[in-house]
């Protein structure tokens, strides 16, 4: 029987571990993987999500390559991928449907300590940024010593921006600035 006041289609979902190594300079943060990504067990697994095509264009790899190759291409360019939330309750895939009382955030204090070369956080959409500011920033012992940039969501649910404009915004964020992949190249 469903809990009173709770949508019976709401289900508990748990995210993925980070895609990162200790050399990461840029961390891309989403909110929580959608149903298609959870089913595929891949970050940005929805076939219409623009994340992999954008990253492939920026870094010169095939966005249709096997998942493991795409992940390695990002790691080679010192880009890590994770989500703000470790778990939540949500019917379907929309961020707007996340039960805000159910959110469990990932261990950012531990992640930041293990990745001292990070220089920029790139939020994949407004929800990831808002959740990070609300649930993570207040828990960190020290202020962050790097940039935080909100980028247009790559989700197919956010189609209001032209793909070329999204790509330009993402390229500027992941390649701009000293110590970023554009200056250092693949390691």
Image: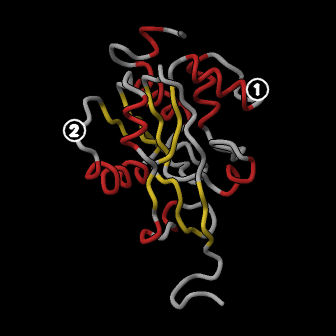
Rendered residue at 28%/45% (across/down): 140
How much space separates mark 2 and mark 1, taking CA atoms?
Answer: 38 Å
Q: What residue is shown with label 1?
A: 65
Which circle marks residue 161 in the picture?
none
Q: What residue is shown with label 2?
A: 143
Rendered residue at 44%/54% (across/down): 105
Residue 184 position within the rendered picture, expressed as x and y whole percent measured from the top left: 44, 8
- Is 84 displayed left or right of 15 in the figure? left
Residue 37 drawn above or below residue 53: below
Residue 168 or residue 150, whichever sits in front: 150
Rendered residue at 71%/22% (across/down): 62
Mark 1 burial class by Cα count in 10 Å: few <14, some 14-19, many 20+? few
- Give the mark toward the camera: 2 or 1: 2
The quadrant where residue 131 appears: bottom left
Residue 14 position within the rendered picture, expressed as x and y whole percent measured from the top left: 59, 57
Instruction: Give the SS element for disc 1.
Output: loop
Instruction: Give the SS element for disc 2.
Output: loop
Residue 28 drawn above or below residue 61: below
Residue 99 position within the rendered picture, expressed as x and y whole percent measured from the top left: 48, 70
């Amino acid at each position: 029987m469903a809990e009173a006041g709770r949508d019976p289609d709401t289900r508990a979902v748990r995210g993925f571990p980070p895609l990162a190594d200790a050399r990461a300079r840029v961390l891309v943060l989403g909110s929580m993987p959608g149903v298609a990504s959870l089913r595929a067990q891949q970050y940005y697994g929805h076939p219409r999500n623009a994340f992999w095509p954008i990253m492939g264009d920026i870094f010169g790899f095939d966005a249709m390559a096997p998942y493991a190759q795409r992940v390695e291409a990002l790691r080679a360019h010192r880009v890590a991928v994770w989500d703000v939330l470790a778990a939540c309750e949500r019917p379907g895939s929309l961020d707007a449907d996340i039960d805000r009382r159910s959110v469990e955030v990932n261990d950012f204090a531990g992640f930041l300590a293990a990745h001292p070369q990070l220089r920029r956080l790139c939020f994949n959409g407004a929800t990831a940024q808002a959740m990070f500011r609300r649930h993570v920033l207040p828990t960190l012992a020290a202020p962050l010593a790097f940039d935080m940039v909100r980028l247009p969501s790559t989700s197919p649910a956010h189609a209001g921006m032209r793909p070329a404009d999204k790509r330009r915004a993402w390229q500027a964020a992941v390649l701009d600035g000293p110590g970023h992949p554009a200056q250092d190249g693949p390691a």
